[in-house]
Amino acid sequence: MATRGGAVPFRSSDGLSTRQVGNSDEVQVRIDPLHADLDDEILVLRSQVHKLRHVAQEIHSEAKYQNEFMDQLQMTLIRAQASLKNNMRRLNSSIVRSGSNHVMHVVLFALFCLFLVYFWSKFSRR
């Protein structure tokens, strides 16, 4: 017996079988009363439903934990980005402020060297 999608349906040894209904996620259960011990089948189904419920709860807990972790990571990155932007602004203003002093020192040193070379050349001719 084949179902839609090519999957083989679950079939117990005691006459309980399942099949999918249409394109939905519903499962239709058919019980063959001649070969079935209904209480055992119900207990097996109950156990499987309990396991599936437990798995679904674990998936939900993990998804919730991962979402909280992603939110914290995003907030940390936003804070780091703001801090980096602030530090870059301070560094740029510091470079501009101290850079103009350095340029002035270099220009004065160059002028001093030019005068030194000029006077040295003037006095070396005599």
Image (cartoon, helix red, strand yellow):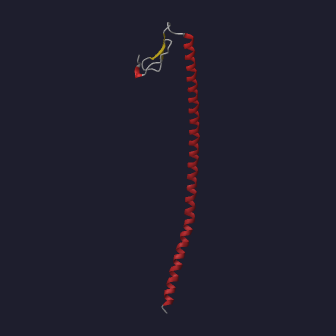
Please state which of residues 32 and 101 is positioned toward the viewer in this rendering.
Answer: 32
8 to 34, vertically: above or below: below
Numbered disc total? 0
Q: Position of residue 46 (x, y in %)?
A: 57, 17
Q: Position of residue 104 (x, y in %)?
A: 54, 71
Q: Position of residue 95 (x, y in %)?
A: 55, 62
Residue furthest to the top in view is: 34
Q: Position of residue 34 (x, y in %)?
A: 49, 6
Please state which of residues 100 and 30 is positioned toward the viewer in this rendering.
Answer: 30
* Residue found 58% across the figure and 48% down from its top: 80
* Residue found 57% across the figure and 36% down from its top: 66
* Residue found 47% across the figure and 21% down from its top: 25
Residue furthest to the front in view is: 13
* Residue found 58% across the figure and 43% down from its top: 75
Q: Quadrant of residue 92?
A: bottom right
Please state which of residues 14 and 75 is positioned toward the viewer in this rendering.
Answer: 14
Q: Quadrant of the N terminus?
A: top left
53 to 106, vertically: above or below: above
66 to 14, vertically: above or below: below
